[in-house]
């Protein structure tokens, strides 16, 4: 019996690690710090518990700032119409979201506007953060 208890106790950090790594919107982002970024996609990482994409954003003096943008989990993105190739390296996009509380160039991307004008909503419905404005069908 002691062996079983020790085995379970030893496995807990391995199992609990991903759960503890998952965070709520309010722990990381400021819901009062809306941000709009227009930039070029440099990379897309489809991974759990959240996917990330990276942008190079030019300021008014043409200086480039690197940004990382968090989205929902891959299965959440697929349910919202995304495909693994929806964001391509070199593609220009506009991101509406919220800045990270820690002041880094990190944003929670709630809405991504593709070059075609298609709006892709990317926030997770269960992260505690504000949901994107809905377009059409009675939305604003």
Image (spheres, helix red, strand yellow):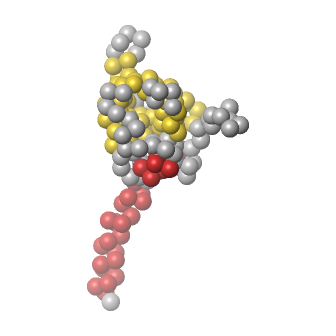
Residue at image location 33% in from the left, 43% down from the top: 45
Q: Is residue 4 left or right of residue 131?
A: left
Image coordinates of residue 104 in percent, x first then y, are 40, 32
Q: Is residue 97 at all visible to an observer of this figure? A: no
Residue sitting at the far bottom: 1
Image coordinates of residue 135 in percent, x first then y, are 63, 34
Nearer to us in this view, 59 or 33: 59
Quadrant in which the C terminus appears: top right
Vertical side of 87 occupied by 65: above or below? above
Image coordinates of residue 53 in percent, x first then y, are 37, 37
Vertical side of 92 occupied by 31: above or below? below
* Location of residue 9 (image quadrant): bottom left
Nearer to us in this view, 116 or 13: 116
* Location of residue 82 (image quadrant): top left
Quadrant in which the N terminus appears: bottom left
Q: Is residue 33 left or right of residue 44?
A: right
Q: Is residue 126 left or right of residue 44?
A: right
Vertical side of 130 occupied by 8: above or below? below
């Amino acid at each position: 019996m002691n062996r079983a208890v020790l085995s379970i106790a030893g496995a807990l950090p391995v199992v609990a690690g991903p759960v503890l790594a998952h965070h709520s919107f309010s722990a990381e982002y400021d819901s009062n710090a809306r941000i709009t970024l227009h930039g070029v996609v440099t990379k897309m990482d489809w991974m759990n518990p959240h996917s990330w994409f990276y942008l190079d954003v030019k300021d008014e003096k043409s200086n480039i700032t690197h940004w990382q943008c968090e989205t929902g989990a891959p299965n959440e993105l697929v349910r919202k119409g995304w495909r693994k190739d929806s964001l391509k390296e070199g593609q220009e996009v506009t991101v509406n979201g919220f800045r990270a509380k820690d002041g880094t160039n990190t944003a929670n991307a709630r809405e991504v506007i593709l070059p075609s004008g298609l709006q892709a909503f990317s926030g997770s419905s269960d992260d505690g953060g504000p949901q994107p404005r809905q377009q059409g069908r009675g939305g604003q």
